[in-house]
Image (tube, helix red, strand yellow):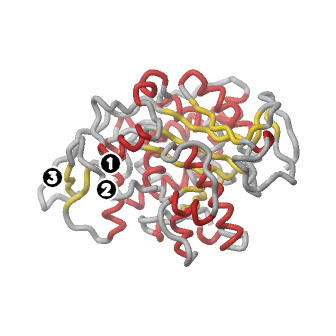
């Protein structure tokens, strides 16, 4: 039954070579439930080692868009030089042992991990490269059901072009900027922090070290690709080695195959936690669909609703907390969240995002944030991605 459903639904999902890939959303909503069932089937089959998903090749990055005729229907784009500085902010309980020796925390575990605590509370940022990608995803498949809150952060080459022309709203301008840059550029790093319903992190191995995942991608080439110079310099100072990424990094196509079958996407029971995350989700959707982003916000949010049914954007939540302001680092300072690892590396930032979310939820929202789900800061609220 799984095979038949996969053939029918994935057949419509992965035919980007015809120009009608997943971002053609005319029939997407009607198949959303089926696609989620496909995700579950793929996950079960991967766990039994009886299938491998073969995703289509990622399209070649489009050339920088040039200014178009003012009468053209699509907004024109003004490209910046490869070394141009980025002018604004880069949109920021039972115990169980699986086959990988993973120990689930008991109900008395600390809600927020202590980076400076004892061995049982230490946090490890697990670096993921091409040679350990499959093993790390196998671990993720084991823990996602018990730790369904997924805090995410990405690092990418900055903002290199901006649209020109008339827009109906600031949100339309923001999305046009997002699409132009995501379509043109490559993801550099992705951080994922999984947590349980009380904020607890999964623990691995006999040492029960709490863990966070950091995926390093190979596609970005600083000698070839366009980028915002201040963004890349910031990442270099933060410890990202672009040569090592090129040599050892994860292939985005294989990452997409494994993410599709992991139970992390296409799953109504997984809750994504982010900070100013339009670009983060843009890059993930580009990888998952093997295509450019949809032309409209409506198309973008329809895809969001399928792949990431429930999303919390902390930057949106902060609008309802009068005493909170600023970026992720400022928020962490205000909430007294301690950092593990380097700032502006995706694994460390995803952990800070996770800890900040749980402190916000308990301190400002009386433990309930459901009605604030589905809004990405800077994009249209009425196109919310929540399943509610």
Q: Count residues near mark 1 (Cα–Cα under 10 Å), then give few for <14, some for 14-19, many for 20+.
A: many
Q: Count residues near mark 2 (Cα–Cα under 10 Å), then give few for <14, some for 14-19, many for 20+.
A: many
Residue 259, position as x, y percentages in the image: 58, 37
- Give the secondary structure at mark 1: helix
Task: Locate residue 387 relative to residue 186 in the image: left or right.
Answer: right
Residue 133, position as x, y percentages in the image: 59, 27
Disc sitting over residue 177 in the figure: 2
Q: Earlier in the sequence, mark 3 or mark 1?
A: 3
Disc sitting over residue 379 in the figure: none
Residue 208, position as x, y percentages in the image: 80, 37
The residue labelled by disc 3 is 67
Residue depicted at x 43% and y 36%: 15
Q: Quadrant of residue 89?
A: bottom left
Residue 174, position as x, y percentages in the image: 34, 61
Q: Nearer the viewer, residue 172 or 250?
A: 250
Q: Count residues near mark 3 (Cα–Cα under 10 Å), then give few for <14, some for 14-19, many for 20+.
A: some
Residues at discs 2 and 1 in contact (Cβ within 8 Å):
yes
- Give the secondary structure at mark 3: loop
The residue labelled by disc 1 is 181
Total labels: the figure holds: 3
């Amino acid at each position: 039954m799984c095979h038949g459903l996969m053939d029918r639904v994935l057949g419509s999902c992965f035919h980007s070579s015809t120009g009608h890939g997943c971002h053609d959303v005319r029939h997407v909503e009607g198949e959303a439930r089926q696609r989620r069932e496909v995700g579950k089937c793929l996950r079960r089959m991967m766990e039994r080692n009886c299938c491998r998903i073969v995703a289509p090749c990622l399209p070649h990055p489009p050339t920088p868009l040039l200014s178009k005729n003012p009468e053209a229907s699509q907004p024109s784009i003004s490209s910046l030089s490869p070394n141009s500085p980025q002018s604004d902010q880069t949109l920021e309980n039972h115990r169980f042992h699986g086959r990988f020796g993973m120990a689930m925390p008991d109900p008395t575990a600390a809600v927020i991990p202590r980076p400076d605590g004892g061995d049982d509370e230490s946090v490890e940022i697990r670096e993921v490269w091409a040679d350990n990608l499959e093993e790390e995803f196998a671990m993720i498949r084991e823990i996602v059901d018990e730790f369904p809150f997924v805090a995410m952060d990405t690092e990418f080459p900055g903002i290199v072009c901006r649209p020109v022309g008339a827009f109906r709203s600031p949100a339309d301008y923001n999305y046009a900027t997002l699409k132009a840059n995501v379509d043109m550029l490559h993801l550099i790093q992705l951080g994922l922090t999984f947590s349980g319903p009380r904020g607890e992190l999964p623990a691995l191995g006999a040492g029960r070290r709490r863990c966070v995942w950091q995926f390093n991608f190979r596609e970005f080439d600083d000698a070839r690709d366009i980028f915002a110079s201040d963004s890349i310099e910031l990442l270099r100072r933060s410890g990202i080695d672009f040569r090592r990424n090129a040599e050892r990094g994860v292939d985005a196509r294989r990452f997409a195959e494994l993410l599709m079958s992991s139970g992390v996407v296409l799953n109504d029971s997984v809750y994504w936690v982010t900070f100013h995350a339009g670009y983060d989700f843009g890059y993930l959707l580009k990888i998952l669909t093997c295509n450019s982003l949809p032309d409209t916000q409506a198309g973008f949010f329809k895809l969001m609703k399928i792949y990431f049914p429930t999303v919390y954007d902390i930057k949106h939540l902060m609008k309802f907390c009068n005493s909170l302001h600023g970026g992720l680092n400022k928020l962490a300072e205000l909430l007294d969240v301690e950092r593990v690892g380097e700032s502006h590396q995706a694994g460390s930032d995803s952990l800070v995002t996770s800890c900040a979310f749980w402190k916000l939820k308990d301190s400002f929202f009386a433990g309930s944030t459901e009605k604030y789900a589905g809004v990405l800061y800077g994009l249209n609220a009425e196109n919310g991605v929540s399943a509610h």
